[in-house]
Amino acid sequence: MYEGDEKLKRLVQDLQNENQQLQSRNQVQLASQEQTVDKLEYRLLVEEQLKESQERFVTIFEKSRVANKIININLKMIQINDALCTMLGYSKEELLGTTILQYTHPDFIQYWHDMHEALWKKELPSFSLEACLIKKDKSQIWVLVNTIRFRDKGETLGYTALQDITERKQLDKHKDEFIATISHELKTPLTSIKSYAQMLSRYFDKLEDPKPKEMLLRMDSKVNSLTALIKDLVMASKIDSGKLTPRSEEYRIDELVSEIVNEFKTTVTTRRILLKRTESLKTKGDKFKIGQVVENLITNAIKFSADDTEIHVFLEKRNKEAVVCIQDHGRGIEKESLDHIFARFYKVKEAESNVESGMGLGLYICKGIVSNQQGRLWVNSEVGKGSVFCFSLPIIE
Ligand code: ADP
């Protein structure tokens, strides 16, 4: 072969190689171009979806008949809708930059403020309350407030929906007045019956036959139940109308629970009431009313379990909550009743039970008190084995 041919062959080979390289580089470039186009299309799609969802949010926020506001950490309103302006009678310009507490009735400012503090400190993920607002024309309006915390571009913000409940409040007021009158009218003759019974009891002491005295004692106990029922009725009516604005004080829930358990131990000898687990936990709210809840749950545990069984009381910390549980080894509650047990006037059918039944208000009242203090009340129960009633309250660390 000639030297020239050899050179030519190598040249062709080189050119072919270079061509191949160029082709594969081209393919890589093409693929990356396609990827870029894909990415761009994807970004456009995401942006479009984001825009759509923002528009949807703005429409819902703006057009909603519920008054909406977004607040910053200083409680200043940074976004509001027309419904809020109509509700308060102020213009958007007048409201933006101010706080809702400026339009709140003085009775509700402290509690609402405390709830916000707990929300910002992450003690609560959200809260709800009922409050009275004062409009520009000085008239009053009742609202149901629901607030949640969220983060936006690194900033902590709050979203609140305010619902007008003035009409319901007025109806509640009439009902309250009615119940207050009825209970007052009932209390007066009951007090007289009780004092007559006491007088008769002294008279019967002198008789040889013990029967009249026994009957009188039974009558006295019925009068006591009736008095307790009236008290429950008044309390339930207060819960319905949201009048249970809790007193706010810091207290140790473990101390409260052990005080109550000790009181029961001295007065109830037919059951062993044991404080099984406890730890030092602080909470904020109405100590007296929470005491009533614990008492009520222990009383039920006694009422619905047999003599000589044990009642266990636990207190423990679960996440940011104190959880109190009262466990009995009594008759338990049927599955179908469990869903209704906290409803007003609900009573489990007591076919062959000799337990003195109330009006079915006790657990309803307990639930009202606990949820009024941003807690929950629930039950686990098995027929024949017993029940565990638990409630939670947010703790202060
Ligand atoms: P009341 O005020 O009439 O006692 P509650 O609201 O306290 O009513 O209780 C409602 C119903 O739940 C009662 O009728 C009772 O049958 C049932 N109940 C409550 N606590 C227990 C318990 N620890 N064990 C079994 N049943 C219970």
Image (tube, helix red, strand yellow):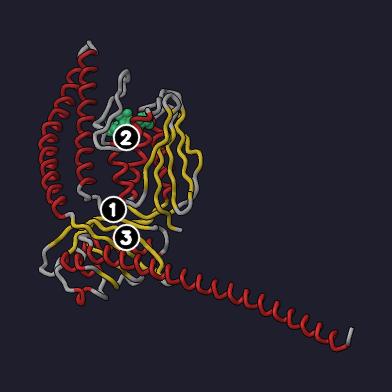
Q: Nearer the viewer, residue 388 or 311?
A: 388
Which residue is at a point 16% across and 22% down the rendered structure image? 200
- Residue 83, horizontal then vertical, whole percent: 19, 65
Is 123 placed above or below 290 here? below
Secondary structure under tag 1 reads loop
Q: Amino acid at mark 2?
A: Ile
- Mark 2 lies on a secondary structure that is loop
Q: How many residues crowd mark 1 within 10 Å: few (<14), some (14–19), many (20+)?
A: some
The x, y position of residue 182, in whole percent, is 11, 38
Compared across the picture, whether 55 is left or right of 219 comes to right
User: Which label sits on residue 246?
Assistant: 1
Q: Which residue is mark 2?
A: 341
Residue drawn at (29%, 36%), measured in percent from left and top?
A: 362
**Image coords of residue 36 (percent x, y):** 53, 74
Rendered view: 3 above or below 184: below
Judge from the rendering whether residue 312 lies leftward or rightward of residue 358; answer left or right: right
What residue is pinned by disc 3? 147
Residue found farthest to the bottom: 4
Residue 244 pos. (x, y %): 25, 50
Do the numbered discs 1 and 2 sit on residues whose CB atoms are within 8 Å? no
Q: Residue at x 36, y 68 (%)?
A: 157
Between the residue at mark 1 and the residue at mark 3, the CA separation in whole angstroms equals 18 Å
Q: Is mark 2 within 8 Å of ligand 1?
A: yes
**Disc 2 crowd, CA 10 A, few/some/many (<14, 14-19, 20+):** many
